[in-house]
Amino acid sequence: MLRDDLIGYLRHYAESIGAPVRTGADVTRIAPAEGGGFNVATTRGGWRARNVVLATGGYQKPKIPALPAQLPGHILQLHTDSYRNPGQLPEGAVLIVGTGQSGGQIAEELLAVGREIHLAVSTCTEAPRRYRGQDLLYWMMQLAQFGPDYGLNGLTVGQLPSPAARFACNPLVSGADGGHDIHLRDLGRRGVRLHGHVEAADDGDLVFSDDLPKRLDQVEAAFYQRMKPMFDSYIAATGMSAPEPEPPRKDDWLPSEPARLNLEAANVTTVLWATGYRLDFSILDIPVLDEWNYPRHRGVTEHPGLYAVGLPWLTGHGSSIVAGVGRDAEYIAQHIAQNIAAR
């Protein structure tokens, strides 16, 4: 959906179910109440609730490395959370750190208006926006929702290699102009200066890892190693009609940027940190978080009446997106209803 369509969809949904939505009210603290339930402090007064659902999503606080303190003070530093458009930025070159969806999409936007761009490449995988006749997200949602019925569990939380994998970046694609692929080598050929991972700042220089060719190979291969076999297996298992897969994209173009970048010599005046987000449940005065600051027990916490929904990989890949959150929400709503009926 386009932005205005999505806003309209959410408004219509709230109206259709009569949801008493309160906007402009920040929750500042949630604590157990004497006799059961919760005391909820907000900027619009205190509330009492029998049940609380944490539905704040997984993008609460920008995650920024310690490096910004070592950069020259005249350089504008923004996390992508604060970026709105190219007009925000001063004249000069822009360094974008990170190549998840935000980093790649902003690089395209800045390139389109003629800005000089340096791009520090992370390990977020590239992927085709469309595969075998359908949008990438279509296949991901089909596999997440129906895959287990066919023994295909690759997009369930139990198949993650570690808890840290819940915070991995999404495939590097764009929704602009109807949706399209983003390829880092293509950006490089169009003038974007590609670098490795930012490792250190040294007297006005940034030092990058020297593994850029390996990184580019890794981000290009990951889709074909993990996602493509899952999609193909799902298509075969369901007997769906789909075009034959296209062969993997072959591209051996390599950049030739040095491992050090002098920010002044390169006229870099802006650094955009496309480094993702971290969870922040500091409003919660109840010990239900694990070492990753994640509510334990996947939605139904051990504290009676306290729930979570909409977090990345709460139960599966679709848990944190509009198209997939309903499955977890339905389970939690039923759990709340049963508890109310039992009282």
Image (cartoon, grey):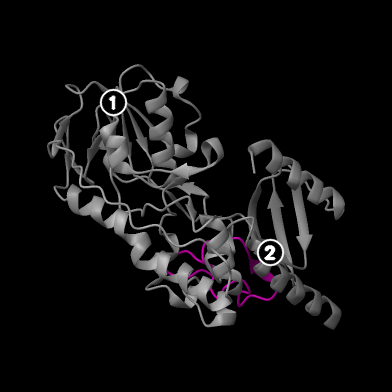
In x, y percent, where is residue 138? 57, 59
Residue 314 x, y percent position in the rendering: 55, 68
Query: SS at mark 1?
Result: loop
How much space separates mark 2 and mark 1, taking CA atoms?
A: 46 Å
User: What residue sits 51% from the left and 66% below the top?
Assistant: 313
Q: Which residue is farthest top?
A: 91
**Of label 2 and label 1, which has the lower sequence position?**
1
In the rendering, which numbered label is found on residue 288?
A: none
User: Which of 97 and 184 lies nearest the eye of the viewer?
Assistant: 184
Secondary structure of the residue carrying numbered label 2: helix
10 Å crowding of disc 1: few (<14), some (14-19), many (20+): few
Residue designated by label 1: 73
Q: Quadrant of residue 70?
A: top left
> Which residue is rendered at x = 16% and y = 32% of the image?
261
Kind of residue at badge 2: Gly
For label 2, count other residues whose C-alpha is less than 10 Å away and answer few (under 14), some (14-19) or many (20+). Answer: some
**In the image, residue 152 lies at what x, y percent?**
50, 78
Residue situated in front as seen by the camera: 33 or 194: 194
Above or below for 281 versus 270 = below
- Judged left or right of residue 26, residue 19 is right
Relative to 312, does residue 256 appear above or below in the rendering? Answer: above
Is residue 281 visible in the rendered structure shown here? no
Residue 90 as seen in the image, left or right of residue 266: right
Total marks placed: 2
Residue for badge 2: 326
- 195 over 299 or under it: above or below: above
Q: Is residue 28 magenta?
A: no
Q: Residue at x 29, y 45 (%)?
A: 66
What's the magenta region? 288-313
Q: Quadrant of the N terminus?
A: top right
User: Which residue type carries mark 1?
Assistant: Gly
